[in-house]
Amino acid sequence: MDDGSEDQTSDIARLAGAQVIVHPSNQGKGVALKTGFHAARDADIIVTLDSDGQHHPEDIPKLLEPILKGEADVVNGSRYLNGNGKETPGYRRVGQNVLDIATNISSGDLDITDSQSGFRAFAGHTLPVFHFHSKNYTIESEMLIEAANAGLRIKEVEIHTTYGDENHHKMNPVRHGLSVLVRLLQDMEFNRPLYYFTLPGTVMIIIGVLLGLLFFGQYLGGTMTTLLPTALAALITIFGSFMAFTGLILHSVSRMIWRTMGK
């Protein structure tokens, strides 16, 4: 899949015998995957890998094996399985950990160690599950979340990675990570309202009550001459209660919708 590239990769791929699908202009990884999956809609298994040379094609049989054995519907190639990934730049690994946690929370029951991996295998029957709403690199987390919500069996296998010069990447890795995190938080607002609203709301309630008792005790003891801090603590408690109940209400509505849809 050539998403409007300006190098000679497409020509080299054609010379090697590959069928190349081309976007005249760059439309983003999500759109490229959507086009590629549509073109391969009759395939038994679809394998995706990034075109920057970091993935090793000889690892493809590892990804195919769980599907061929009937053990998985989606296989995620992980750079960090079994404690690997020491060659990953430190700042990238920190960002990856944050995105892994956010993806696992948003999906509900995943335990993925490399949510941003582009090296994956999909059984052909899984194609209708994916909607490709994301146009950019947030598509990696979106696909895992959709697969988990659909009840697909997801397995991770260990892959090898070779990192080259990062200066050729179009998007700054920090900006990339932040954009993915923002999208995940937006999805979590609807998919996991208990995490997005109720959990932080509960924390705010606890903090507000503790601070309120502390400040009011200091006021009664004469070490504080104003009730303003106590009033601010009360506001924190009230706002936390509002967030907590909002999460509970949204969670109830979400469960009703899923039951109505028969899921």
Image: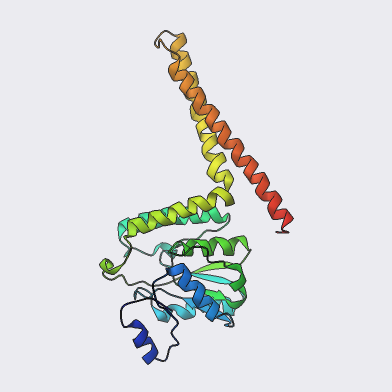
Q: Tell which residue pokes out farthest to the top in this image.
A: 222
Q: Which residue occupies 58% across, 46% down?
A: 193
Q: Which residue occupies 57% across, 62% down?
A: 146
Number of marks present in the image shown: 0
- x then y, percent, for residue 35: 50, 75
Instruction: Give the quarter of the figure containing the N terminus.
Output: bottom left
- x then y, percent, for residue 122: 55, 74
Instruction: Give the quarter of the figure containing the C terminus.
Output: bottom right
Q: Which residue occupies 58% across, 54% down?
A: 108
- x then y, percent, for residue 207: 48, 29
Q: Is residue 131 left or right of residue 166?
A: right
**159 shown above or below 171:** below
**218 shown above or below 79:** above
Residue 77 appears in the picture as rendered: no
Name the foreground residue: 102 vs 3: 3
Name the foreground residue: 37 vs 78: 37
